[in-house]
Amino acid sequence: MEKDYYELLNLKIECSQNEIRKAYYHKALKYHPDKRGQDDKESLKIFLELTKAYDVLSDPKKRREYDEKLKAKLQQKARIEKFDAKRRQMKEDLDLKERAFKRQKTEEVLSQEQLKNEINRLREEGIRILNQVRGEEEEEEENNNINIESQISDMDKTLILKWKNKKYNYTQKDLEEIFLKYGECLIVMKDKGSAAIQYKSLYSAYSVMMDKQEKCNKFINKIKISWAGKEEPQIIKKFESNFQNEYKKYRSSNQSNINDSSKISEFNINDYNNSNKDKIKIEVSNEEKLKHSDQSSFSSNSFGFSFNATEKMNMSLDDYENYTLMKMRKLEKEKMKEALLKENDK
């Protein structure tokens, strides 16, 4: 958001449509190119800004979205000013104490040890106040994040993938290697070159879409990616600055890894098998096989999930505890899959 359109038209945010039309008419006449001349670039720039402002504010839907962004921006500005005022007050308090201490020093002869102790005391007090202000900032940021999370649905965190099946024959394992780098997610495959991904965090889904837009990840450039809800979730528009800041943090911490061709998986069963001598064979139950076949179909309104895990795996008796943890994680993922299927059925 570059300009405050209300300020540009000398209006208040609660003004009526009639007031917007009048303000635009008077200002546009003043800076119109026919009146100022085509060579007056500054007037032309102002005229174009006025036209854009009127286009947004005269449309109820655009104005409503703009008002939400403007209010969020003003609230953030107020918070920053509030904390800046606290910092200024803190600095003034410290300056007063230091000046008082210096005056006391001129009146009394203090030992070097007393001076050192007093300086350390003032320093510790300053650190305490800084930590207090920082804690308040972190608490408010945490509250904002909780507020954002409460407004996010599973559909908001879901992305639809499509690719040319004949050219790029992606498997679920391939997609996991590409998209798990953005965060914990559930991937549901569909026949004929398509799949759905539901992330645990909306920030992860937003990072995927931003990387796709900025062409930062060579692996996802070959895949068509869209929001499951057909358009970007409204919560992103409402808290745009929060999502942009999270994406910048993600880019700075993951830039060296996002195009890494090394394979990542949570449990590599083949490597696990090769490291064990004493093994037992665990057969996948017929019930799971039937579930695999029943859920292999995929309709346009719901996503069926088919298990691609190895049906047989060898496991060391000494590492039975690790196997139990794997089973618990698998059950957790199945619950996430069921939730995604229900969401898509709606």
Image (tube, grey):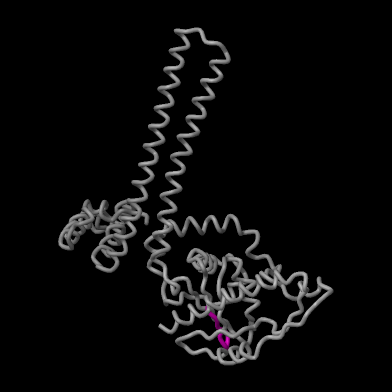
* Percent x, y of residue 182: 57, 66
Q: Nearer the viewer, residue 330 or 216?
A: 330
Image quadrant in which the N terminus is located = bottom left
Q: Is 58 situated left or right of 18 in this image?
A: right
Q: Nearer the viewer, residue 183 or 35?
A: 183
Kindly identify the residue that appears in the image at 44 percent across and 74 percent down: 155
Q: Is residue 39 visible?
A: no
* Percent x, y of residue 150: 40, 64
All told, the count of numbered labels is: 0
Q: Is residue 292 above or below residue 337?
A: below
| Residue 49, quarter of picture | bottom left
Q: Nearer the viewer, residue 126 or 229?
A: 126
Image quadrant in which the C terminus is located = bottom left
Residue 281 falls within the magenta-colored stretch? no
* Percent x, y of residue 204: 52, 65
Kindly identify the residue that appears in the image at 81 percent across and 72 percent down: 276
Q: Is residue 82 above or below residue 34?
A: above
Q: Is residue 325 above or below residue 138?
A: below
Q: Is 26 situated left or right of 117 in this image?
A: left
Kindly identify the residue that appears in the image at 71 percent across and 85 percent down: 283
Q: Is residue 3 visible?
A: yes
Q: Nearer the viewer, residue 153 or 261?
A: 153
* Percent x, y of residue 82: 36, 41
Q: Is residue 50 above or below residue 156?
A: above
Q: Which residues are magenta?
A: 190-196
Q: Is 11 situated left or right of 266 in this image?
A: left
